Image (cartoon, rainbow, N blue to C red):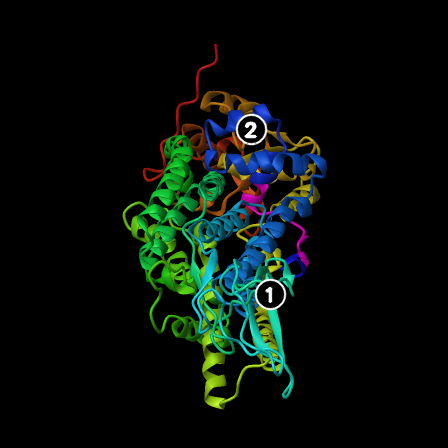
């Protein structure tokens, strides 16, 4: 994941959202705190985390590096979930599949909080498994009570691998080469070959514990009771911090509740989870209250339709047709059969709610109160590779049974490598998408290009007008291109005013500043120059009125997401009066 993310991470320009992170995180802590009272409180914790990063080395690579590290951690956590819920090869496949998904690569190179949120949710899910169980300690096998399963040892040996306190699926016994003994293959948190040593039941000697999934030895472990209270405390803390990074991450609690419902866990587990969830929600309440008053920031969102759902599916599993179909088939295969047994957190019971519940909830709410954007539920993507890997594992098991061969070390290794090869094919199929995503033109805008164009065409002392005020984002992110120009409408710079783009002067003062100006550069959002746009802010109305009535465009330069126009003043006899259909022009104030 880290290698893929480093490819093209310095793409030569920030887009508008990244520029907000860059300019806000570089402010002083009091200035950041002042800003959060009026706007962008939902990203407040992220800005505070980015403050020391950009203070040490401001730049685009440093801006995106935390997201890349978080994406790499998430891929590792997805792999750990696969190992814990199924077997090592499922974890390997799921982690690699997550890493090559284009949507993951996109946000791994984005200077925003979404990759960090995905890492927090994956970590919280792993903590949920730890808190619920399983430990194990009783072996239900075919040997005498307490002696473990009767597994053949070296030729001439008696019964006897004792199952100890390792986790379910920690290790298993597999045959050696034909004709000689047995090897014990162990894969646990300590790495390959780490087995727990436990006393033999009848005294004398020590045996390595074996817990496997059927096959040779057919060992199984009886789960212990739920984890200790500290597990729930850490789980609640991780969920709370993750939700503070972005409040929609709190929807993961609904996904985890669905997991517990499917697993039919005990009342003690529900009690522990409920206390942790309540604590996380309580931490989030103040942020929810503040951000509710800043809801205008998402006013641009619209109610999602079927196209949004289809686009989300393609983003989660990969847009390439050669990947989309097989990926969905593997997910369906993983869901064939019971989702979970009572008290057991199976892979489908964990991954399916994680994949479906947060997006479905946000989509349903957004039908009445538009809040949905696919990046807000990036963390739910982790469920897709887990299910696909489980489906591939089921397919491999079915193929082995049809072949009528017993699994051995060589066979298991070959199957694992075959799955890795399949992920590599998916990566190659999606390589054009990944390559295109490194192009700055794939973002909504490129503020570096706007600043460079301004540097080439504007002269020292030229007045500049930003229409509307948020078009100033290019000058805030890349001030070098606008150095020496005069921002004709600005009253107070952004850091001092506690705003994102500065505080502008009022209509009367703006008119006075335009007196004697014969030419002005306008940096505008494309929609602001369309005939039908009518801003609600009086100062923006004055800008439009002055440009339409007293100036004419002389030159225009278009960059994606931004338009630069040079306006020159009309001759006095050619000044236009507003037409009946145009916005009313506020009266020019009388000078004393």
Indicate the quadrant where residue 568 lies. top right
* Residue in the picture at 33% in, 69% down: 338
Q: Is residue 354 above or below residue 253?
A: below
Q: What element carries label 1?
A: strand
Magenta highlight: main SS? loop
Name the residue beneath numbered marker 2: 32
Q: Which residue is drawn at 53% across and 33% down?
A: 500
Which mark's residue is nearer the viewer, 2 or 1? 1
In this picture, is 12 found above or below 322?
above
Of residues 421 and 261, the one nearer the viewer is 261
Q: Nearer the viewer, residue 480 or 292?
A: 292
* Residue 66 visible to an observer of this rendering: yes
Mark 2–mark 1 distance (CA, rounded to whole Å):
56 Å
Rendered location of residue 218, percent (x, y): 47, 74
Residue pointed to by mark 1: 208
Q: Position of residue 93 (x, y in %)?
A: 55, 69
- Cβ atoms under marks 2 and 1 closer than 8 Å: no
The answer to whether residue 560 is magenta is: no
Position of residue 413 measured from the top left corner of the image (x, y, whole percent): 61, 77
């Amino acid at each position: 994941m880290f290698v893929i993310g480093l490819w093209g991470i310095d793409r030569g320009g920030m887009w508008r959202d990244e520029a907000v992170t860059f300019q806000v995180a570089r402010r002083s802590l009091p200035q950041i705190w002042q800003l959060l009272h009026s706007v962008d409180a939902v990203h407040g914790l992220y800005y505070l985390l980015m403050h020391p990063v950009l203070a040490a080395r401001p730049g685009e690579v440093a801006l995106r590096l935390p997201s890349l590290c978080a994406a790499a951690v998430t891929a590792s956590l997805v792999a750990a979930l696969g190992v814990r819920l199924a077997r090592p090869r499922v974890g390997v496949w799921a982690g690699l599949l997550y890493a090559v998904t284009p949507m993951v690569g996109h946000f791994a190179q984005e200077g925003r909080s979404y990759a960090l949120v995905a890492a927090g949710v994956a970590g919280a899910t792993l903590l949920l498994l730890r808190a619920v169980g399983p430990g194990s300690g009783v072996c239900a096998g075919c040997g005498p009570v307490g002696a473990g399963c009767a597994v053949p040892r070296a030729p001439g040996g008696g019964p006897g691998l004792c199952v100890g306190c390792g986790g379910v699926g920690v290790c298993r016994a597999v045959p050696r080469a034909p004709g000689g003994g047995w090897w014990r293959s162990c894969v646990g948190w300590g790495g390959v070959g780490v087995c727990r040593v436990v006393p033999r039941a009848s005294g004398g000697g020590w045996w390595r514990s074996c817990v496997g999934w059927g096959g040779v030895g057919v060992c199984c472990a009886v789960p212990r009771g739920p984890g200790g209270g500290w597990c729930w405390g850490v789980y609640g803390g991780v969920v709370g911090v993750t939700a503070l990074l972005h409040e929609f991450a709190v929807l993961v609690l609904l996904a985890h509740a669905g997991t517990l419902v499917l697993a039919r866990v005990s009342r003690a587990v529900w009690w522990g989870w409920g206390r942790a969830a309540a604590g996380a929600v309580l931490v989030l309440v103040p942020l929810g209250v503040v951000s509710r008053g800043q809801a205008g920031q998402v006013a641009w969102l619209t109610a999602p339709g079927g196209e949004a759902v289809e686009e989300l599916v393609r983003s989660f599993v990969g847009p390439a047709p050669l990947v989309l179909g097989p990926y969905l088939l593997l997910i369906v295969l993983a869901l064939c059969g019971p989702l979970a047994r009572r008290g057991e957190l199976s892979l489908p019971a964990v991954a399916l709610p994680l994949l479906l519940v947060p997006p479905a909830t946000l989509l349903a709410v957004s039908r009445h109160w538009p809040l949905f954007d696919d990046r807000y539920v990036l963390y739910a993507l982790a469920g897709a590779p887990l299910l696909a890997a489980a489906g591939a594992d089921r397919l491999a098991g079915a193929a082995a049974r049809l072949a009528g061969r017993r699994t051995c070390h060589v066979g298991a290794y070959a199957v694992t490598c075959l799955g890795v090869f399949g992920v590599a094919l998916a990566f190659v199929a999606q390589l054009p998408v990944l390559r295109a995503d490194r192009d700055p033109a794939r973002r909504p805008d490129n503020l570096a290009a706007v600043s460079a164009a301004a540097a080439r065409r504007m002269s020292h002392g030229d007045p500049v007008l930003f229409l509307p005020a948020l078009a100033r984002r290019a000058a805030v992110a890349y001030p070098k291109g606008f150095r020496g120009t005069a921002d004709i409408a600005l009253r107070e710079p952004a850091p001092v005013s506690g705003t994102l783009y500065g505080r502008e002067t009022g209509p009367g003062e703006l008119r006075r500043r335009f007196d004697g100006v014969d030419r002005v550069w306008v940096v505008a959002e494309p929609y602001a120059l369309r005939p039908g746009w009518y801003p609600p802010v009086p100062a923006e109305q004055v800008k439009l009125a002055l440009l339409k009535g007293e100036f004419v465009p002389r030159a225009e330069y278009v960059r994606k997401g931004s338009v630069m126009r040079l306006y020159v003043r009309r001759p006095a006899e050619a000044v236009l009066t507003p037409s009946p259909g145009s916005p009313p022009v506020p009266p020019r104030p009388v000078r004393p």
